[in-house]
Amino acid sequence: MKKAFRIKKNTEFQKVFKKGASFANRQLVIYYLYNEQQLHYRVGLSVSKRIGNAVVRNQIKRYIRQAFTDMDHRIKPTYDIVIIARKPTRNMNYHEIKKSLSHLLYKTHLFHG
């Protein structure tokens, strides 16, 4: 995932939290906000220190970014998306995280078709 497609500023995160909708499963929480002015979706990630040390947190973030890259062609382009990882993600591998993420994107109608 390109860095241009990431949400980094706290004000942008807060905008998605306050104005957007959310959905969750046991492993992940998704917040999403429609933004018609952009040509590609943007993603922000939040992994709390309660989940593990820096190595574990960075690995989870890498897995989520790679899952977005793999599903890139299926995701609607006009959304800001924030993903919050929950504690069960620390024991999950890439394929489990990708499956959980695709479930959330499907349930929130962020996939094409």
Image (spheres, grey):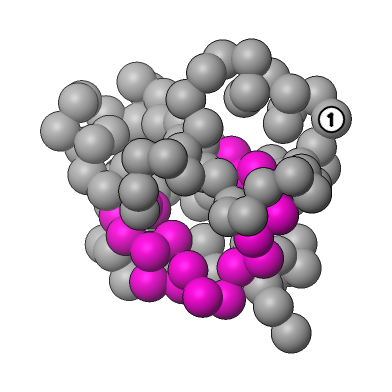
Q: Which residues are magenta?
A: 63-83
Q: Any magenta on residue 59?
A: no
* 95 sits left or right of 27 in the view: left
* 3 sits left or right of 28 in the view: left
Q: Is residue 29 above or below residue 103?
A: above
Amino acid type of the residue tagged 1 in the rendering: Lys
Residue drawn 64% across the image and 60% down it: 77
Please tell me how many numbered marks the rendered image carries.
1
Q: Is residue 85 above or below residue 95?
A: above
Residue drawn 52% across the image and 44% down it: 43
Which quadrant of the structure image shows residue 95?
Answer: bottom left
* 56 sits left or right of 67 in the view: left
In the foreground, 97 or 31? 31
In the foreground, 22 or 9? 9
- Mark 1: give few (<14), some (14-19) or many (20+) Cα within 10 Å: few
Disc 1 designates what residue?
A: 19
- The C terminus, quarter of image: bottom right
Which quadrant of the structure image shows residue 68?
Answer: bottom left
Residue drawn 56% across the image and 15% down it: 10
In the foreground, 101 or 6? 6
In the foreground, 61 or 33? 33
> For the residue labelled by badge 1, is the local secondary structure a helix, a strand or a loop?
helix
Whether residue 95 can be seen here: yes
Which quadrant of the structure image shows residue 112?
Answer: bottom right
Residue drawn 27% across the image and 34% down it: 57
Q: Position of residue 25 (x, y in %)?
A: 63, 55
* 82 sits left or right of 85 in the view: right
Q: Position of residue 109 (x, y in %)?
A: 76, 68
Whether residue 29 can be seen here: no
Q: Position of residue 19 (x, y in %)?
A: 84, 30
Q: Position of residue 20 (x, y in %)?
A: 80, 37
